Amino acid sequence: MSVLNALNIHLSASPLGEAHDIVVAYSGGVDSHVLLHALSELKQSQEYVFNLHAIHIHHGLSQNADIWQTHCQQVCSDLNVAFQTANVAVEAQARQSLEAQARDARYQKLVELAPADSHILLGQHQDDQLETFLLQLKRGAGPKGLSAMNQQWSVATAKGTESKTVNFYRPLLEVSQQSILEYAQQQKLKWVEDESNQNAQFDRNFLRLDVLPILQSRWPELASSVSRSAQLCAQQQEMLDEICAEKLVHIQTNKNCLDLNELLKLNEKWLHQVVRYWLSQQGVSSPSLAVLQQLLPQVLLAAEDATPILQWQSWQFRRFNQQLYVIPEPVDLSAFETVWQGESTMNLPEGLGALCFSQSNNQLDSSQAYLTINPNLGPLTVRLGGYSSKFKPKGSQYSKPIKQWFKLWKVPPWIRDNTLIIIQNQDVIGLVSEGKCYQAAVKLNHIRPIFISLQK
């Protein structure tokens, strides 16, 4: 299938047929350049009506990254396409490849920069799908992995009271790389070449450079055949997901936790399927089969008084109060203590967010979690740790060590570690954590109070 034929098919149907803003994730390489150029040509033909944008992400991983950025800007200027570019910092981290981190950072920035409800088009093609399928096969993947790359998905984000959804779409998955190169040569396009693509130390490049030329010389239709297999695997996974969604209704008690008793009613195979589906709904990378096989004996069936942890990549399965949780790997927080100096925002360490201080003559929304303090009663100290300190919550007759209140309130251990203690005149007057605030009795004495809330 040619590039223009593929784009005509997708632009004539849902969802691209209704798209108001189309954004090309433009690296400067031949695939995204051809995609951008072809869309520009179709837009100028006035057969389709949409706003065309391009976004280039500068990772800084190549010494040529500045040249690529300038090239992309010039191409968009020549095509009269709205252009945005942004730099992202990518640092090597344990248990995750630099390539995966660069991809995640790129997608995150694309979502941030793209207009709301826009469609971000990616340039991956049929040969990329073949590589992905074989890499998943090498890893021992099931139907979900062998579905290879999705054609479309959406990402919803929220910042304060504002929410935003953008849609990703791959319109060239049935187009061969040869067809893309033919289009580029016919149009006399100039593109950039990433030198890392010639490094066979990377698995994908090893396949592309050393393996696929041999396979495709024997079986020229291999990419097309594998594309059909990937589509069949995707259909099988969709049917599995429908059943998992039905089962999850009776098991899920909150977004990030499952009822242990209900979960244990499933046999092990369905347990693995439901857990995978639950993770995918939260955007959490699925663990390997080896990790899932440890879930039942090491976490779900562990001794009742145990606090088991099962980790993969940067995620953890945790069990608490007869619930199975999935949480990001907690940061090992160092001691933190500071005195409030009257600022409206106090930044907290290790991604905990910020404490926001505000004054109001009116009672705040009762659905919001906040502390109310009397600033006339002395300076405020904010600290982490020290849960042996005693605390008397508002409405309680008793004062107990904070750790005893945590146990009574059934606060999970990983949330306890992130709980801020608010102290005034050596008395604990409040606790703030994970959107919850526990307030001690506070004397306001007809003054204008200060409200404290935690924002991530």
Image (tube, rainbow, N blue to C red):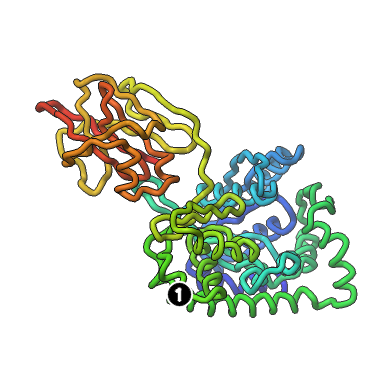
Q: Residue at x 50, y 63 (%)?
A: 300
- Location of mark 1 (residue): 265
For residue 178, what is the image quadrant?
A: bottom right
x, y (%) of residue 115?
Answer: 48, 52
Q: Residue at x 61, y 52 (%)?
A: 313
Left or right placement of residue 325 versus residue 57 in this view: left
Q: Is residue 193 above or below residue 399?
A: below
Q: Is residue 92 above or below residue 316?
A: above
Left or right placement of residue 349 versus residue 108 in this view: left
Viewer-proximal residue among 413 and 352: 413
Left or right placement of residue 134 versus residue 356 in this view: right
x, y (%) of residue 337?
Answer: 41, 25
x, y (%) of residue 323?
Answer: 41, 60
Query: Can residue 50 be seen in the rendering of this structure?
Result: no
| Amino acid tagged 1 | Lys
Q: Residue at x 16, y 28 (%)?
A: 448
